[in-house]
Structure formats: C-alpha cells, structure tokens
Amino acid sequence: MNRAAFLGIALIAIGIFALVFNFNQPVFSTFTSSTIEINEKEVIDGKNIETIDVNVSSPSVYLIPTDSNEITVELIGEISEKTDFEFDVTSRNNKLDVYVKNSTTVSGWFNFSTMTTNLQLELHIPRKEYNKLNVHSSSGRITLNDLHAKNVELRASSGRIEISNVTAESEINLQTSSGRIEAVNNTAKSLQARASSGRILINGQISEQISPSTSSGSIVLENFEGDVSAAASSGRVSIINDQLVGDINVSTSSGRVEIDLKNAPTSALIDFQGSSGRGSVNLPGLDFEEKSNNRVYGTIGAGKYEIKVRTSSGRFELN
C-alpha cells in the first residue's frame, strides 16, 4: 500500500471516529464521569409478609435475618452521576416486591448502557417461615443466610449465588448462567442447582433429592444426606461422603466422575457404563457380574442403594 492510500484511509478513520464521538457524547461522558453515593432506605411492617420477590439488574443482594418485626430495605453504594435508576418497594396482599433497575439509555449508534459500581441491596427481614423467597439478579451476587421458607428460588444471569443454613419445607431452586453456586448446610425436601458454565459446590445438604447440573462447570458434593441425580457435559463431578445414604445417579459427556466413600457400603448396586471412558471400582465385598474397561456391574450385599454412572469419554472412579 502506497503512502497516499494509507494516509487517505487514516483520514477516513479519524473522520468516522469524530462523527461517532459527536453523536455519542453521552456514551463517552458516562464512562468518564465521577460517581455519587447512594443511600436509599425503606421500612415497612413485616408481620403479615409471607412472600418476598426481589428483581434487580446489577446490585448484589443480601437477605439478612433480624429479630425485628419490621423489614428494612437499603440500597447503598456508588454509581455514575449520569446514571438513572429505579428503586421501588411495594407491599400488597402479604407480598413484598423490591425492584431495582438501571434505567439509563443512550441514544446513538451504539446504545450503550451505563455501569453501576459497588451497589448493593440489603433486606433485613424478620426471622420466621415465609411462603416463598424469590430473588432474581442479572449480574449481581445473591447471598442468603439463616432463613426459613417453604420455597426458595434464587436466579442470577452471571452473578454468584451463596446460600447457607436455610431451611425450605419444599424446594430450594438455584440457577445461574456463568456464576458460581455455593450451598452450605441447607435443608429442603429437594435441592435443584443449575449452572451453565459456573462451578457448583454443595456441602452439608439434607434433602430427599439433590439435583445439581452444569454444562461446562464442575460439581462438588460433600457431606450430604439424600438421593443424588447429577449431570455435567464437560465438567468434573466429585462426590465425597462418609457413607452411602441414598441412590446416586451421575451422567457426563466428557467430564470425570469421582465418588469417594470413607466407609465402604454394606448394601449397594454398582452400575457403570461408558462409551470410551474407563471405570475403576475399588470396594470390598463387591460381587462383579460384569467387569471391563468401560462396563462395571455388581452388588454388595442386598444392593439397597444404587450407584449408576454413565459417561461418554469421562473416566469413573469409585473408592
């Protein structure tokens, strides 16, 4: 390319950039503007509140138990001074709705939205049994501790979910796209935990049914009680427990499956099959009916609990 042509292209590029800049002054000024402090607070009577529904765009959400009968909702942190947001708290028909959304839009070619920084939503709620606790966040973290409800549902698009010491009479449902899920010392009739690419860690869960699933993230399940049904596409599945206390059903495509029981089971049925993945089972008293690199079938005692594992190319180890 000769010098004249190069100079012409450079001038055209500079002209386009200048045009975009002029049409999108709000875009560039948004990201270079200073921040302002936010401290919004709403207090309502929580005696008759049975359901709490929280919907936010980017703030982290914390549900915190309190001995008061009042519910205190606080939005605190910093945002760009050019950011507009909606903060709405309403109570009706024994239900509390909390809504926080970035309402800033920018006209022009790119239509960028502004970004908030260090913004968090805190709900201080009375200690009692709720009918439902529902939290949905686009990108912020969700944290829930020491609460009691019939149903708990936490959903995050890319944010992290942390839940501990929560009791649910029916179901705990946790969903995230790319964020991590950590569930520690919870009790529920059933636990559903689904992540697209994030890691799932479940420790100390007591449930009739525990069902973690992920596409590319790993699953770690430790110190639990109940039946397990786990699925992963390419992530590793690691199950560690003192003893076999229920059925375990695991399926993976290319992820590795590891099950480690500190005390050998006295009554179990082992059923492993892999396409190209190999299986290794080291349990005393196992009576093999089938045993090959990609197929293991046998029983210990009466075969009370079943360990069923299916893999495509992932390896399976049971110890």
Image (tube, rainbow, N blue to C red):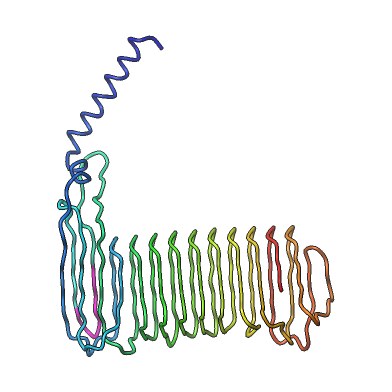
Vertical relation: 309 (above or below) 130:
above
Residue 217 shown left or right of residue 65 in the figure: right
Query: Which part of the image, by quadrant, shows the C terminus?
Result: bottom right
**SS majority, magenta:** strand
Stretch in magenta: 91-99
Q: Quadrant of residue 154?
A: bottom left
Vertical relation: 307 (above or below) 113:
below
Residue found farthest to the front? 262
Please state the horizontal and vertical placement of residue 97, each as a whole percent of the image: 24, 75
The residue at 77%/63% (across/down) is: 294
Q: Is residue 92 magenta?
A: yes
Vertical relation: 140 (above or below) 67:
above
Please state the horizontal and vertical placement of residue 62, each as a whole percent of the image: 30, 72
Please state the horizontal and vertical placement of residue 205, each as a whole percent of the image: 51, 81
Residue 214 shown left or right of residue 88 in the figure: right
The residue at 84%/76% (across/down) is: 289
Residue 95 shown left or right of residue 253 in the figure: left
